[in-house]
Image: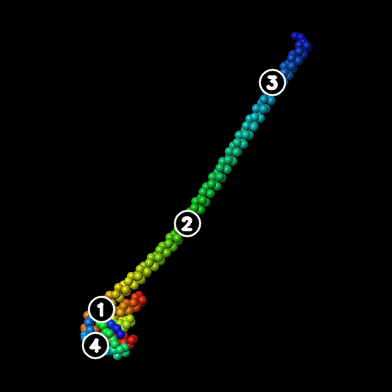
Amino acid sequence: MKIVVITAEKLEANRLEDIKSILAKKITKTKLDVQTVIDESLIGGIQIMIGSQLYDGSVRAKLSQIKAKTYKLI
Amino acid sequence: MDIQIPQILFQIINFSVVTGALIYFLYKPLGKMLDERSKKIDKAAKAADESIQEREKTEIDKKHILQKAEKQALDIIEEAKNSAKKQRLIILEEAKKEAQEEIKKMSKNWESQRKSQESQMRVEFTNTVLLVTEKIIGKLDKKTKDKLIDSELKAILGKI
């Protein structure tokens, strides 16, 4: 199964391994193909794409949510 | 001196004939003419009197007509004054209403503009705050950034 880990800065090797092992425990598929992508526009946090499903834990997403909620109030 | 009767008689007859002729041919027509002239004078005098009376009556009528006209003119002036007063009041009232409407409209516009500016300011403020937050987070130390990743990873794993 293809998994893409997207961060704002490059992850250290041991840290990436930790993330891989955590994902492997959670996703019980036989083989995981983990790729890493750097996207500075995320600012911080992490995005994980499992197949076609994107899980967005980036600072950019959080700020967008805050912005949308604030605009609604205005 | 002899009195001659025939001569006297002749004189009497002659006198009588002359007198009769004078009366018949002169006195009667002259009297008639005088009567007619007198009547004419009376008639003219009467006409003159009537004319004077008529003139006096006309003068009185003229005076009445003038008085009536004067009164009508005064009434018309009074009516015009009253009408002008009413018109002035109506115009003033309308102007007052228009001014109030205008003030209301302007207040509404100002309020709307104020709200719009306030809204714009809030948006700008929010954008500024978010931009500053972005910059601050971008400059966080590695340890804090890793913590942020861990926290988000945990949240994502909860969703998987």
Dot 3 alpha-carbon crowd within 10 angstroms: few under 14, some 14 to 19, many 20 or more? few
Location of the C terminus of chain A (image quadrant): bottom left
Across and down, in percent, residue B31 comes to: 68, 25
Q: Residue furthest bottom?
A: A25
The answer to whether tags 2 and 4 share a subunit is no
Across and down, in percent, residue B34 comes to: 66, 26
Q: Label 2 lies in what chain?
A: B
The answer to whether tags 4 and 3 share a subunit is no
Q: Is residue B83 above or below residue B12?
A: below
What residue sits right under mark 4 in the picture?
A: A17
What residue sits right under mark 2 in the picture?
A: B87
Q: Are marks 1 and 2 in contact (CB under 8 Å)?
A: no
What's the distance in space between the residues labelled 2 and 4, CA to CA?
94 Å
**Which element is circle 3 on?**
helix
**Which element is circle 4 on?**
helix
Hey, what amino acid is under mark 3?
Leu
What residue sits right under mark 1 in the picture?
A: A39
The answer to whether tags 1 and 3 share a subunit is no
Hey, what amino acid is under mark 1?
Asp
Question: In the image, which is nearer the foreground, mark 4 or mark 3?
Answer: 4
What residue sits right under mark 3 in the picture?
A: B26
> In front: B38, or A17?
A17
